[in-house]
Every structure is written in structure tokens, then in C-alpha cells.
Image: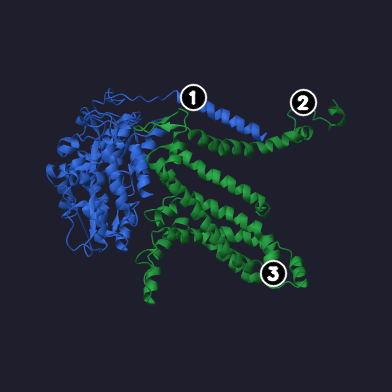
Amino acid sequence: MAVKAVGRPRPKGGGAVPFAAVFWRLPWLRSVLLLTPPLAWFVVIYFASLVLLLVTAFWTTDPFTTQIVQVWNTTNFERILNEPVYHDIVGRTVLLAALVTLTDAVLAFPFAYYMARVASRRVQTLLFAAVLLPLWASYLARVYAWILILNHSGLLNWSLQSIGLPPANIGYTNVAMWVVFSYIWLPFMIIPTYAALERVPESLVEASADLGARRWRTIRDIVLPLALPGVVAGSIFTFSLTLGDYITPVLVGGAGSTFIGNVVFSNIGIANNIPFAAALSTIPVAIMAVYLFIAQRLGAFEAL
Amino acid sequence: MKFGAVVAVALVTGLLATACGSSNTSTGSKHRVPPTASMKPLDKVGAGEGLLNLIAWEGYVDDSWKKSFEQTTGCQVHAQYAGSSDEMVSLMQSGGGGQWDMVSASGDADLRLIYGGDVKPMNEKLITDWPNFQTYFKNPQYNTIDGIHYGISLQWGPNVLLYNTNKFKIPPTSWSAVYDNSNKGLVTAYDYPITIADAALYLSKSQPSLGIKDPYELTKKQFDATVALLMQQRQLIKKYWPSASEEISMFQNGDAFIGAAWPYQTIQLKAAGAPVADTIPSEGATGWGDTWMLATKAPHPNCAYLWTQYVSTAKVQAEQALFFGETPVNTKACGEMEALQAGSCAQYHASEPGSYIDTIHFWKTPETTCADGSENCIPYDQWVSAWTTIKG
């Protein structure tokens, strides 16, 4: 209608309309074009795989040829609910994930506090490099390094024996898994905690001191509550990464160290029973949904 | 918008699901006839198609023998290595199957591929060295059904009892050593459901009243007894070994002293100077037999036959045996092995008579149908879930 009146003079000759003009006239077109590829990727690749996972969980396989039989049923979920071994496995996975998260939070907080609020600029940079350095090496190499430390004739037992103590023999146990997981995911806890601690306003800390609070009181009542979202954000990483891992249990774990991920892996890789694996995979998804809900309530998403 | 997108995706997925759903419906007939049984194999090997796509165990398509094959036949070999029998099955089943020519499957995958219609009959007459094969490997149960060969045997190996000679001064003669409470903390076992067959084999001798005849065909009662034995064994086990290299390092570092192993581990450990030895105990042993199988939709069948002919020759059989630590099926390979490495023929049991091979119970896929035709046997998927239960 009013296009002619407000529009720029049209190019003569009736050829191709320059893009700029089209975008100017149809402002929504630009955002549609810009957003379509990432949105399509998100929907098709990201969501579709999740939906497929959920759908597959309700199918079964032919026991012999292991081909998928597309008949809707809840056998897979009933099996998980009824067989105590899956309760043990889920329980072990969640417990260890929680333990690792707690350990990392306890280790990371003082470290991040020092980095953010005490250390000089130079030391800060050095510490940052130190925290990130392990991430440059392959995950596998780091796990194998721990096997060399923890196994029967490894560095740990060797050191203990050389100072006259009995060997620890924690290689290939759940304790070994706890140690290795805590080590591997520690940087993922330190960094968000550091970011949150750095953002605690100096003025509040000073005000607290002016009002007569001692150092510990200030940390407890001012710094800790303000840094908590950072710790929770870090815990999302440590918790979900442990929850989904299956390599460390294979390499470092012992006879009773099966994780949800291992059962998923063996059902896909060995049994070719993808529906059961899918059903099992929905458990960590559900656990993480609950976890994220709580984390969101604690303000973790503002700290990311 | 967000909700709409989810719905749209769900609809599309649903459509896809129903579209695929109509294509495969499984039947549960009594005596199963493989779907490809009536396909006629080639009569004559023609000229190579210039290309050959293989799914193989790592080390099965090594440059040291692949190169000369490519030069003489003009068939360019592309190998996709798989880490387990089951990965091979899923590779063969995915993507319609038209992209692969052959797979070097082990006995525990063979029947699944055969009954899944993923492989088709092969003509053994086209394999020049076939008459030289050990009798057993001409028609093993795991690749030959009703006289039809769904592949040509390649190599085999026993699952031996490996032990530390310092800890076990008197060599163990029975598998009972790995179930004995006095060996708590010293034992290891292969982390794979087929390990259940090892326990079943032991029970077939130690508890004859159970009536186990074939460790891969277990009735509910036999299966439960076997699982119970393995649950007991778990208390003795520090760690199940997931791969050969893990077991080697466990024996080297004093985290394991006795357990089932492949000859490969023994050879590697001995080469590293570890005090170990292996034996086939009085109950016999399980073992694996590998087969080159031809994909139903193989696009390059002539190259596939040329390859099978080539890897069946004594020379290549010997090279591969020594490279991988296993035993050739071609009896003529012994001389070649000796030439490459003196004493290796006896070391790998390549010169043993047929009676030795009869003590080995080769891996095969456990199925519902027992040998007597009844449907009382426990199929493989239950072996897998039982294995999860055993490991805890």
C-alpha cells in the first residue's frame, strides 16, 4: 500500500531486486533467514535424536536376529523397574556422581577463592593455565595415568611401602573411580566457581567488615551465598559428566563398578538391543531434568 | 513455536517409524531356514571389480599381505575395523548392507548374520585351498547349515587358562581354579556375555547331573546354575578384563594371577618376560573361529572370492596367524609358520590332530532352538542381561 511512497527509488530496468532492499521492506525476512539454519539444526538434529530415543525405548528387538520389532510396549521399562541389578547400577551411578560433585565443590571453592580474590594478576594467570592444562591432554591418557598410579605395583603402593606403610590396593575399585572422576572433572567446577567469586562486589565485603564481621563471618554470610550459583553451575557439569561416563568404570572400576553408561554400551555394542539401551538412557535424562530444575531455582543459570 | 516444532518432529519421526515398521516382521518358525539359503553362489570367479570393502578385526587386513593382493588382482581393499562381533553385526545390518562385501565375523556373530539374511551362501569349490583345511573347519556348525556354507573359515584360537607361574607352582589342570574361593582376588575373566559358556563348560564336567551337553545350548535350569556359579565367582574377581591389553597389564602389575585368556596374551606376556604359562584344562576349553562371510548385497563378489582364495593360501594364513597370535585353518600353513618363526607351529597348536580341536567348543550364537529341536534354550539377549546381573 504505502510501499511506493516510503520506498527508495526502485532500480530501473526491472532486474533483480537488491537483497538490501528486500530486507528493508520485509524486516522479518532477515531474521528468518538468519535463524533458520541454527533453528533447523536444533530441531532436526538435537530434538529429533531425543525424540527418536524416547520412541525407540518403547520398542523391542527380536531376540535372535536382534532386529528392532516396532511394536509399542513398556517391557523395557518394566525390566528396569523389576530387576534389582538395575536399581543397584542406577543407585551406584547417582551416588558416585553426587560424591564426585561434593568432593569437587569442596576442593574447588578454596582454590577458586584464592584465584579470584587473593592471588596477584600474575599468579592468577599461572593458576588458570594450571587448571586448564589437563584439559589439553586426552581424557584417556589421563585415566590411564591414574591406572599406573593406583594399580597393585603402581606409584601409590610403591610410595606407601617406601615409607613403611601397608599398600592401599584401591586400584580397580569404586574408590579408584571416585578419585579419578574427582580429578578429571575438577576444572569444570573451578572455573564457574571462580567466575562467581570474582563477581562478588568488594563493597559488600567491606561493608560487612565495617559492621564488625570477622573474615569467616564475611565468607559465610556474604561470599558463600553470592558464589553459590557458581558452585551449582559447576555441579551441573561434574554431576552430568559423571552420570554419563562409561569409560572410567571400564578402565578404573573393578568387578562391581558398572555404570548406567556401561549397560547402555553393552546393550548397543554387544546385544544390539537399542530399545533397551534407549529405555535405560532416559533415566539420566530424567535425573538431569530434576537436577536442572533445582539448579535453576538456586540461580545457577545466571552464573553460567 | 517451540511446542509446534516438537510436535512436528514427533510427527515426522512417527511417520518414519511406521514407514520402516512395515519392512521387517520377524517370524518364529520351528526349524529356521536362513533367508538367503536358496541364493545360488557364483560358479566361477570372474575378473575383479577393482574394489573390495571389508569389515574386519583389527589386524586382519594388514598391509603386509594386503599390498600384494591389490597388486595381483587390482582389487583396492578398504577395511573398516570393528572392535567386537556385535559391532560387526550392527555394521552389517545398518544402511541396507549394500556398502560392504565381506565381514570376518566370529562364531558368536555368524548365526545372527546368517538368520538375519545379511550374508549369503559361498561356493567352497572356488577356494583352491579349501581341501587343505582342518576337517572341522570345513563345515563348522557356526557357519555351515544344512550343508550350505555361509562363509569360509579363516583362523581360530582357544580360550586358554592363563596363570602366573610364581603364584601357581603346580600348574592348574582344571577350570575349578578360577572358581575356587582360596584364589580370592587373584582371578580375572573376559568381560563379555559369551564368558557364560566357559562356566557352563566347567559345569558340564563338574556337575554332570545338570546334563549340559553344549555350553551354548542351556535350558533355564542349566542357565540358572551357570549364572549362580558366575555370581559366586564375582567375589573372587578384582576386575573383568575388557580388552587383551588390559589383561596383559593386570598380569604384569600383579592385579591378576589366573584367568581365561587368548594365546595372544600369553605370547605378549612371555615376550615381556612375565612369569606366565597357559594350559587347556581337563574340561576342555571354549574358543573362537573366524569366518570370511559374503554380504548378501556385496557389490564386488569377484574381488570377494579372490580375497578369500588369497587369505586361505598357506603363506597368508601363516603370516596372519603369527601377526595376530592365532591358528590357521589351512593345515599346509604349518611349514610356512616354521619358516617365519621356528617352533610357532606347535606353539599355536597348528599341527594338532582333529581330536585336539574336538576339545574346543567354538563360540556360536546361543539361540532359543536347542539341538533337539525344542525351544527351551536361553537366547543370546538373555545372556547379555544375565551378564549385566553377574557383574552387578
Q: Nearer the viewer, mark 2 or mark 3?
A: 3
- The residue indicated by pointer 2 is A14
Q: Nearer the viewer, mark 1 or mark 3?
A: 3
- Tell me the element at label 3: helix
Under mark 2, the amino acid is Gly
Which tint was used for chain B?
blue
| Picture layout, residue A203 above or below residue B92 | below
Under mark 1, the amino acid is Ala
- Label 2 packing within 10 angstroms: few (<14), some (14-19), many (20+): few
Q: Nearer the viewer, residue A119 or B317?
A: A119
Name the residue rendered at 36%, 44% in the picture: B81
Name the residue rendered at 44%, 54% in the picture: A248
Q: Nearer the viewer, mark 1 or mark 2?
A: 1
Q: Which chain is green?
A: A
Where residue B353 appears, as percent x and y from the top left, is: 12, 44
Q: Residue furthest right?
A: A5
Q: Of callouts 2 and 3, which one flags the residue occurring earlier in the amino acid sequence?
A: 2
| Picture layout, residue B55 above or below residue A151 | above
- The residue indicated by pointer 1 is B19
Quadrant for residue B309, please give it. Answer: top left
| Chain containing mark 3 | A
| Chain containing mark 1 | B
Where residue B183 appears, as percent x and y from the top left, is: 26, 59
- The residue indicated by pointer 3 is A217
Under mark 3, the amino acid is Arg
Q: Are marks 1 and 2 on the same chain?
A: no
Where residue B179 appears, as percent x and y from the top left, is: 25, 53
Q: Is residue A268 left or right of residue B302?
A: right
- Label 1 packing within 10 angstroms: few (<14), some (14-19), many (20+): few
Q: How many marks?
A: 3
CA separation in Å, label 2 and label 3: 76 Å
Q: Is residue A215 left or right of residue A244?
A: right
